[in-house]
Amino acid sequence: MQGAAATLARWCGVPKDELVYWAAGINHQAWYLTLRHGGKDLYPTLQQAVLKPGVVAEERSRIINALKTGAPVEVNANVANEGLITNLPAGSCVEVPCLASGDGVHPYHVGALPPQLTALDRASIPPQEPAFLAHKEADPERVVGQGRRRSWTS
């Protein structure tokens, strides 16, 4: 999400550090629920800029730096859904805003996603569940096996 946010900021012509967004969903299918700069909704600007090419990249180093140094940073991360997105299944892997700091990664409560986004996310959860459970159970063979069975796994 952070890499995509930097790209969206560039497309909208605003400094990435001034972009304010709220995003949530499931891994690699999260949604920018709000996108603002200086209190202004950036979706109209983004709609005009959508034809420009861009590259999306994750910024894992920001999380690692926060964990190592204790300097807090807001990121989007994949975590177990423990009531964070209320209309997605409990225990599923979701991507939500989090605060990363020296004492860990702390997810924010998002609430319910709009119904049309929930429908798309719900369709993607069943194929992910076996791999998520294998990871949760710390079974490396099962994790590798699940990855081999999924055409969408890179």
Image (spheres, rainbow, N blue to C red):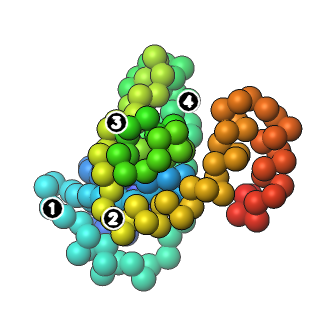
Q: For the residues marked 4 and 3, what is the alpha-carbon distance in whole angstroms?
A: 19 Å
Left or right relative to 124: residue 20:
left
Of the pair 97 and 39, the residue shown nearer to us: 97
Q: Which mark is residue 108?
A: 3
Left or right relative to 126: residue 119:
left
Left or right relative to 31: residue 34:
left
- Looking at the picture, which amino acid does disc 1 mark? Lys
Residue 5: image quadrant is: bottom left
- Looking at the picture, which amino acid does disc 3 mark? Tyr
Of the pair 32 and 73, the residue shown nearer to us: 32
For label 4, the residue is 64
Q: Which mark is residue 40?
A: 1
Where is residue 13? Give x, y as percent. Answer: 30, 66
Of the pair 8 and 1, the residue shown nearer to us: 1
The answer to whether any part of residue 73 appears in the image is no
Identify the residue at image location x=39%, y=78%.
50
For label 2, the residue is 115
Of the pair 62 and 13, the residue shown nearer to us: 62
Q: For the residues marked 2 and 4, what is the alpha-carbon distance in whole angstroms?
A: 34 Å
**Mark before the other along the chain sequence, 2 or 4:** 4
**Mark before the other along the chain sequence, 4 or 3:** 4
- Looking at the picture, which amino acid does disc 2 mark? Pro
- Looking at the picture, which amino acid does disc 4 mark? Ile
Identify the residue at image location x=34%, y=36%.
108
Callout in the foreground (2, 3) = 2
Q: For the residues marked 1 and 2, what is the alpha-carbon distance in whole angstroms?
A: 25 Å
- The answer to whether 23 is drawn above or below residue 7 in the figure is above
Binning the other alpha carbons within 10 Å of mark 1 as few (below 14), some (14 to 19) or many (20 upward) gives: few
Quadrant of the image for the C terminus? bottom right
Q: Which mark is residue 93?
A: none
- The answer to whether 139 is drawn above or below residue 75 in the figure is above
Q: For the residues marked 3 and 1, what is the alpha-carbon distance in whole angstroms?
A: 23 Å
